[in-house]
Image: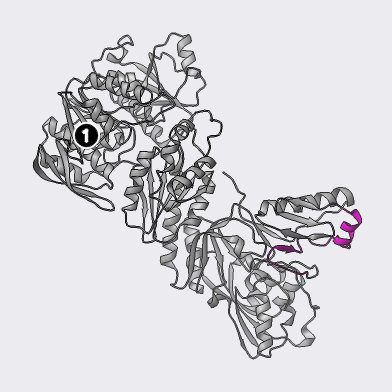
Amino acid sequence: MHARLTGRWTGCLSRRARIHLVGVAGSGVGPLARLLLLLGHQVSGSDRRRTPAVADLEELGLRFSCGHDGDLPEGVDLLVYSSAVGEDNPERKVAAAHGIPTARRADLLQELCRAKQSIVVAGMHGKTTTTALLAHILLRSGWEPSYYVGGEAPVLGANSDWGRGDYMIVEGDESDGTLASFEPNYAVLLNVEEEHLDFYPGMEAICSVFETFLNRCSEKIIYCADDRYASKLCAGRNNAVGYGLGPDGRYRAEGLKLGPFESTFLLVAGGVPLGEIRIPLPGRQNVQNALAGIALSLELGLPFADIGAAMAAFRGVKRRFEVLFAGPSFLVVDDYAHHPTEIRATLAAARGAGRKRVVALFQPHRYSRAHGLEKEFATAFAGADLVLVTDIYGAGEKPIEGVNSERLVRTIAEGSGVRVLSARTAAEAKRTAAASLRPGDLFLAMGAGDVHRVARALAEQCSLYEELQRSLSSSAVVAMGECLAGHTAAGVGGPAEFWCEPASREDVCRLVKIARREKIPLTVLGAGAGILILDGGIRGICLSLRHPSLSRVVVDGDRVEAGGGALLAQVAAETARQGTEGFDFLADAAGTVGALLAQGAGRLRERFASHVEEIVLVDGEGELRTLSRGESEPWLKDGRTGNLGIVVGVRLRMLSREKEKAPLLRVAGSDSGSGEGRVREKSDRWLDGVFRNPEGADLEEIWTRLGPDPIVVNGASVDPSLPNRVRLRGEAKTADVLAVLEEVRERLRKKAGVELACNLAIVGEKEHS
């Protein structure tokens, strides 16, 4: 069916028109496209990327084109755009050049409203929730309304629909002044305050738009009597009906009880108690939103019982205190809050959830808002225990000099009295959040940009963390965002997504199976010598066999059993203490038993392998296997044991002195035992033996002859006389070490014709946004 509409576009909406929508993937234009498709129009649309919402519209018949190249479909009757699409848009230019009529999104929406009894919800905060709630109440009551919601409300099934009923519920938009173009039959005014300062010069201009909107309302106005400006704008209007938590509204909530995830209150109308209302939403702001929906529904004549039942069945809107993960250790919530008032209300709801701490991640939205409301932002975060602040999401705005996230960090710390950290990029935000969380915390992401992606990624991480906790022995160690710098000799490197210290061989089997099922990497970290972890850290599970049950050494006569996490020097010390000979060659060796067998090379590994009688490992399927010497000998000889799995234990035998063929070898700084340089003095901030000596030459001798200047990159440096030793100071990063090593190699390559091989294992991911 087609709506009988009139307007400024030569009546094209009264027939089956060809309508093109610019920015069709957006939360404002997308729902409009759905309405037009349901009305039978031929709809095309463009945007920078195809989204799941666009895919849904394509199933309804949308012709989608990716990008804005100005190539409009043939025969377009009308081009529609949002206020975010400027006059320089190629498609708008083509439409203007060819005389194709154009219309703003809000103007077209208003034209559609003319076909129904329109209800327009307006205000700075709470519009999406209230609009969805009203649509839900009327749908549950059998009124079959049409509706347009600027967000996802799963309870509705879609964010817009064209129903057979007489009413159309619309979420208005005050951000660009187009709210004043609506002529609603019913208006809902939630709140009015300073906002959208990229468009409005101040409160006077804001109030002017709302006043025009209210003046054009032909029936009832429902307004929040708790709000200063809403009350002022509605004062003296005979058609205005107030609601609120205070004493001034006709519809009031009394006996309010705020729970972690729901609110209950007694609804009083004109001094008469009507009954209890329960809504499965937290926070005072949601009670006010609910009162708006209840008040209008009662004014329309719906029975209180139907309204109460609908309220209890409402499930909220996505990105409005949306719980992404709830578990014993963590609660992860995502919210659209980006204005100081919304932030205060959302943090109050989070504080009421009963968790130990509230860790908030805030993505500032628009430079103009950060600049114009700086004082308000300063005090808005007092309800958090820790705040992480990302770079400002510009939303198409040009940066304002001096307005940046670093300034907001200082402002919030001073004004709210909380600890505030900078986490500029999405990757940094996720890493910092994971490292900051403690069991019992609530993590709250807030912002109108793309911060929800961080929240969803962290929710998945928390979910897997809790599965790991449940799956492993009680004495096993599981951590998120564990800093790996403390687990390596270099003392640098990013975090592990999951750090696991299994307490048994069975735990190792479970970890391998989980990693295989989730298709995530599993990295085994030994003693941390001879390894450099990149600053982006290690994705997936980082497994350490340093738990006592997997790193002990047991000596029984000439038989020795060692866990895969046992240090090589520990084997030498324990056998010597028990009077068992033949293992003193391990006294100065770095690394662990498992790392040497899995990844090692050279004479040290060959000599150790000669003592191996049996290997116990966990294979790639997560199964425990025991290999006798005969079964494992081929792999021990060619160094491919690591391909078989994770070595969790070995049984060693003592050899007679005649069989000890290899000379004593001291290994410097290699977890895998592949280094063969001389042992140097060590400390926790020195990296020794970083290069292998060139064949038939001495590295230090060549370096000294070149007489190079010191090489310094931030906190990493190489002394002119010691090219094989890197000194680390202060906040040195792995990137600094790699830059120093590359400079050493480049100088030797150019000046001495020598190619150096790095003696360090480099693992992990680079730091990226």
| Helix, strand or loop under label 1 | loop
Pinpoint residue 395: horizontal percent, then vertical percent.
47, 31
Residue 71 visible? The answer is no
Question: Residue 473 is drawn in which quadrant?
Answer: bottom left
- Residue at (40%, 66%) from the top-left corner? 470
- Decide whether the magenta segment is chiefly helix, strand or loop: loop
- Residue at (32%, 19%) from the top-left corner? 108
Image height check: is 86 above or below 751?
above
Which residues are drawn in magenta?
680-707
Quadrant of the frame with the C terminus: top right
Q: What's the residue type where badge 1 is placed?
A: Ala
Pinpoint residue 429: horizontal percent, then vertical percent.
51, 48
The residue that disc 1 covers is 225
| 180 or 425: nearer the viewer | 180
The stretch drawn in magenta includes residue 428: no
Pinpoint residue 457: horizontal percent, then vertical percent.
46, 49
Image height check: is 437 above or below 613?
above
Residue 42 visible? The answer is yes
Residue that lies at the very extreme toward the left in this rendered image: 272
Question: Residue 20 is drawn in which quadrant?
Answer: top left
Question: Residue 721 is drawn in which quadrant?
Answer: bottom right
Quadrant of the frame with the N terminus: top left
- Residue at (36%, 22%) from the top-left corner? 205
Image height check: is 609 above or below 532?
below
Q: Is residue 140 left or right of residue 111?
A: left
The stretch drawn in magenta includes residue 688: yes
| 439 or 389: nearer the viewer | 389
Assess disc 1: are there few (<14), some (14-19) or many (≥20) residues with their C-alpha within 10 Å of its C-alpha.
Answer: many
| 7 or 434: nearer the viewer | 434
Pinpoint residue 133: horizontal percent, then vertical percent.
24, 37
